[in-house]
Image: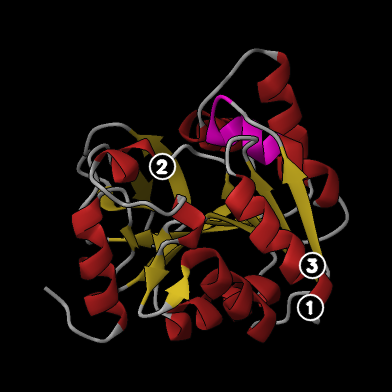
C-alpha cells in the first residue's frame, strides 16, 4: 500500500509567528512532523511513500533526499509549487493508480494507535474510500460531513447540518477510482480538496466515515505545544 504526504504549503502563518523551520521540519516532541508521518506509515505496512514539497524549501528537500538514501521503504519526492492541496494531490496521483492508498497533509496530527485501526479497517473494507473524521472541532474552516446510520458519507458541507456529527480529519484512504474523479475535477478547473470530496459523492463512490477521538492541525505557533500535549495523552 502506498502512503502519500502533501507538504507543499508555504507555512506562512508559522513563519510570521516566529517559527524558523519550514513546516515539515517543525518538531513535535523532538521529531520533525514529516519524519513522524514516514515512521508511522512504515510501521503500518507502507510499500512506498510519496511526498510533495514546494520549490521554496531547500532545507526540506535536502532533509528528504537524505531520508531517500537511508530509509528502508522507498520514498519518492516531488518538488513543485502548487496553488492548492488538490493540485498537490494531482501531482502525486501518478504514484497512486495501482492500488489502495492513504493521503494526508504533513500537519495533520493523530495518535498512531487510532491510525493503525483506521488503516486495518480500510484494508479490509470494500468501500471506495474511508475518511478519517472527528467530532473535535479546532479548525478555522471545518469541512462538515453528513453520514447515515451506517457511517456511509452522504455529503460534505461548509456549514453544519442536522446530519453532521463529524468534520473531516484530513486523512483520506482511497482507491484508484478516486483518481478518475480527481482528473475530471482538474479538467473542469476545480481547485479545492473539499470540492473534490463532494465530487466523489456526486460520482457515486461509496465512502465510509471512520471516527477518531481527536485530530489536530498545526497552523499556528501555539498549535505546536497543543499537538505535543495531545500526543503525550494530555487532552485539553
The first of marks 2 and 3 along the sequence is 2
The label number, if any, that marks residue 11 in the structure image: 2
Q: Earlier in the sequence, mark 2 or mark 1?
A: 2
Q: Position of residue 123 (x, y in %)?
A: 69, 74
Q: Is residue 108 left or right of residue 59?
A: left
Q: Which residues make up the magenta segment?
A: 83-90
Q: CA distance from mark 3 to mark 1?
A: 6 Å
User: Which residue is labeled 1 in the image?
Assistant: 70
Asked if one can make out residue 127 in the rendered structure from this viewpoint, the answer is no
- Residue drawn at x 78%, y 35% as measured from the top left: 180
Which of the pair 12/119 is nearer the observer? 12
Q: Height in image: 67 above or below 219?
A: below
Asked whether the beta carbons under mark 3 and mark 1 sit within 8 Å of each other, the answer is yes
- Disc tally is 3
Q: State the image coordinates of residue 51 (x, y, percent, origin top left).
A: 69, 54
- Report the residue marked by disc 3: 68
Residue lying at the far left of the rendered structure: 236
Quadrant (top left, top right, bottom left, bottom right) of the C terminus = bottom left
Where residue 106 appears, as percent x and y from the top left, is 50, 56
Amino acid at each position: 500500500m502506498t502512503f502519500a504526504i502533501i507538504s507543499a504549503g508555504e507555512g506562512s502563518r508559522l513563519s510570521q509567528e516566529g517559527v524558523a523551520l519550514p513546516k515539515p521540519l517543525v518538531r513535535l516532541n523532538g521529531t520533525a512532523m514529516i519524519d513522524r508521518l514516514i515512521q508511522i506509515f512504515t510501521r503500518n505496512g507502507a510499500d512506498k511513500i510519496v511526498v510533495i514539497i514546494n520549490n521554496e524549501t531547500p532545507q526540506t528537500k535536502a532533509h528528504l533526499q537524505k531520508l531517500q538514501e537511508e530509509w528502508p521503504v522507498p520514498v519518492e519526492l516531488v518538488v513543485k509549487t502548487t496553488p492548492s492541496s488538490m493540485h498537490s494531490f494531482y501531482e502525486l496521483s501518478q504514484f497512486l493508480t495501482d492500488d489502495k492508498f492513504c493521503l494526508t497533509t504533513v500537519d495533520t496530527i493523530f495518535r498512531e494507535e487510532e491510525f493503525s485501526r483506521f488503516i486495518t479497517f480500510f484494508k479490509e473494507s470494500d468501500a471506495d474510500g474511508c475518511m478519517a473524521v472527528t467530532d473535535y472541532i479546532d479548525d478555522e474552516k471545518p469541512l462538515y460531513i453528513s453520514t447515515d446510520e451506517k457511517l456511509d458519507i452522504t455529503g460534505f458541507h461548509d456549514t453544519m447540518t442536522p446530519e453532521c456529527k463529524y468534520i473531516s480529519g484530513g486523512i483520506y484512504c482511497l482507491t484508484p477510482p478516486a483518481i478518475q474523479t480527481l482528473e475530471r475535477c482538474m479538467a473542469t478547473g476545480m481547485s479545492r480538496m473539499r470540492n473534490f470530496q463532494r465530487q466523489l459523492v456526486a460520482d457515486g463512490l461509496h465512502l465510509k466515515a471512520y471516527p477518531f477521538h481527536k485530530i489536530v492541525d498545526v497552523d499556528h505557533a501555539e498549535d505546536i505545544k497543543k499537538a505535543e500535549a495531545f500526543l503525550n495523552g494530555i487532552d485539553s
